[in-house]
Image (cartoon, grey):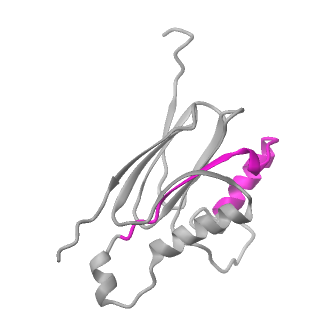
Amino acid sequence: MSAAIREVAEVYLGPGEFRFATCPTRLRTILGSCVAITLWHPKRKIGGMCHFMLPSRVRCSTALNGLYADEAIELFVRQARAHRTEPEEYQLKLFGGGEMFPELQRHVAFSDVARLNVNAALEMAALYRLDLIAQDMGSTGYRSIVFDLCNGDVWVRHQPIRTLN
């Protein structure tokens, strides 16, 4: 293998998982109503991704949990500062928040988790003054996400749910 070719680690994130990397890494996940937050520092080529499931919770401890949007952002902020960077220096991309059961929305009264997750992601971006450069959120169905920390690219494959009329 030549010196020009570098090994790239591949990491799959499940719900609630968070990963910050400083070496060549591809982060992957699959989203339904959950949202993935990607942050990338274009000069340092470092960053991370989380896969959150819910906007927030009532905290019983000081331990942060990536299952929740507000805590996932705090994890990013801590990592950014631990690497001597500021959150505002990162490029933010948001994905997911697809309604998984559109037919049930018409018949059952329940909270629209997908919509709440999308709103929470946008609110956190504004609260922390993050540079939101791309998003693919809402609609129906699931998304497969691949985030390449070598160049900041994110590939998205969106599979909408077809509803019967």
Question: Is residue 22 placed above or below 98 in the rendered structure?
Answer: above
The answer to whether residue 82 is magenta is yes
- Residue most extreme to the top: 2
- Work out which quarter of the rendered image holds the C terminus and state it: bottom left
Percent across and percent down for residue 51 are 52, 58
Give the left or right position of residue 121, taking residue 63 as reference: left
**Count of numbered marks:** 0
Percent across and percent down for residue 142 are 36, 59
- Residue most extreme to the left: 165
For image coordinates 47% across by 76% down, the residue present is 113
The stretch in magenta equals 72-99
Q: Residue 122, can we see it?
A: yes
Percent across and percent down for residue 138 are 43, 65
For image coordinates 70% across by 78% down, the residue present is 60
Q: Residue 21, can we see it?
A: no
Q: Nearer the viewer, residue 69 or 162?
A: 162
Give the left or right position of residue 41, taking residue 54 as reference: right
For image coordinates 49% across by 60% down, the residue present is 15
The answer to whether residue 126 is magenta is no
Q: Nearer the viewer, residue 66 or 69?
A: 69
Q: Which of 30 and 86 is in front in this view?
A: 86
Question: Is residue 110 placed above or below 129 in the rendered structure?
Answer: below
Percent across and percent down for residue 88 are 75, 50
